[in-house]
Image: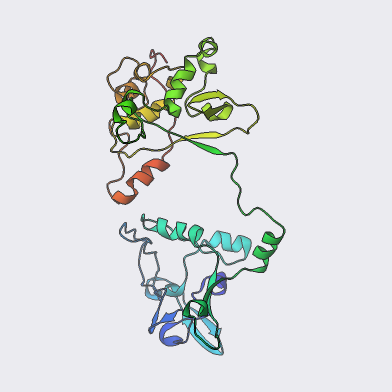
Amino acid sequence: MHYCHRYKLHTPGPCGKHNPASPCMVNGRCSKFYPKPFSNETVLNLEKSKPVYKRRSPAQGGREVVIRRNGKDYTIDNSWIVPHPPAMILRYNSHINLEVCVSSSGVKYLTGYFHKGGDRAMVRSEVEGERDEVKEYVDHRVMCANEAAASIFGFNVHQSFPPVMPLRIHLEGEQQVTFEEGEEAAAVENPRMTELTAFFDFNKLPEERLKAKEDRPTYVEMPEKHVYQKGSWTPRKKAPDSIGRVHMPNVMSGDIIYLRMLLHDDACRGVESFEQLKAGCETYKDTCRLLGLLQVDTHHALPPTLPPSLRTTESGTRRWRRRQRPSGVAR
């Protein structure tokens, strides 16, 4: 209990009626909702971002400790303890807070810190003579010494390596086109080239047809050794290798989901057209099933409790792994 009242006790001492002047008090109540209610077991509620942790009361075997803060003695129990990992606190002898996110609303809390920007302050300046209300309030940015030094010496705040190249995906004849008014027919007859259609044309080159299939790149491997310029793929010369990334379509988009799976698999090596990629099947889903890429028909089913606003995000974070093909099925 020593490390608890040293590192993991809420505020320097109990708040509420014990200390109404505590920094966490807002409108006479603790803004962090301490003391927490007792519970015989940990309860997970998908409607809330945090679970109700197990906190035994003194009557149920929970411990009580008398601490002294600001010349006063306080009796604390488990209701005042902040969630924490005991093993890490004992190892590093420091303040460490650990929470379990059980709801998708926790994503807002986690990503908020990355997009807050620097600390800012509103400063009012008094101007003599004619008032200019716009100039009286200036929005200033607060910069700490470390950030100022990094800016003065030109240190990189952020760097991404290697570069990531987005690769478009679409069904046959369904790529996006741009056209002027009155030129709709010409745009339909001569659709623009995309990275995907250029990939099929690249596989038609004589020098590529001479290579063994295992030596030919998949669609997502193209940016590693090739550059997409002016509607065609050419071998990369000087620029550093890139990583290809195919965006994740909505799970309700239909057959394009299975087209994406095939473009990540060895089945797309050397493929010269959409029809050839289907391998004689009617749909891409049938091709995936034939190649053993699907375990069951509900392979892409998402948890029913997931909010609709995050279903696309959740499906996009799933990694596609190559699955073993049934014996006797040709690549």
Tell how many labels: 0
Left or right of 286 on screen, residue 81: right
User: Could you say which quadrant of the image residue 280 lies in?
Assistant: top left
Q: Is residue 150 above or below residue 28?
A: above
Residue 323 makes an appearance in the image:
no
Horizontal and vertical percent position of residue 255: 30, 29
**Which color scheme is applied?**
rainbow
Residue 151 makes an appearance in the image:
yes
User: Could you say which quadrant of the image residue 284 lies in?
Assistant: top left
**Which quadrant is the C terminus positioned in?**
top left
Horizontal and vertical percent position of residue 175: 36, 30
Q: Which residue occupies the foreground of this view, 197 or 27?
A: 197
Furthest residue in direction bottom, as rendered: 71
Horizontal and vertical percent position of residue 180: 34, 35
Q: Is residue 10 above or below residue 308?
A: below
Q: Is residue 90 above or below residue 263?
A: below
Horizontal and vertical percent position of residue 217: 51, 22
Q: Which residue occupies the foreground of this view, 94 or 186?
A: 186
Furthest residue in direction front, as rendered: 182
Residue shown at the point (39%, 69%) measured from the top left: 56
Q: Which residue occupies the foreground of this view, 88 or 199?
A: 199
Q: Which residue occupies the foreground of this view, 15 or 72?
A: 15
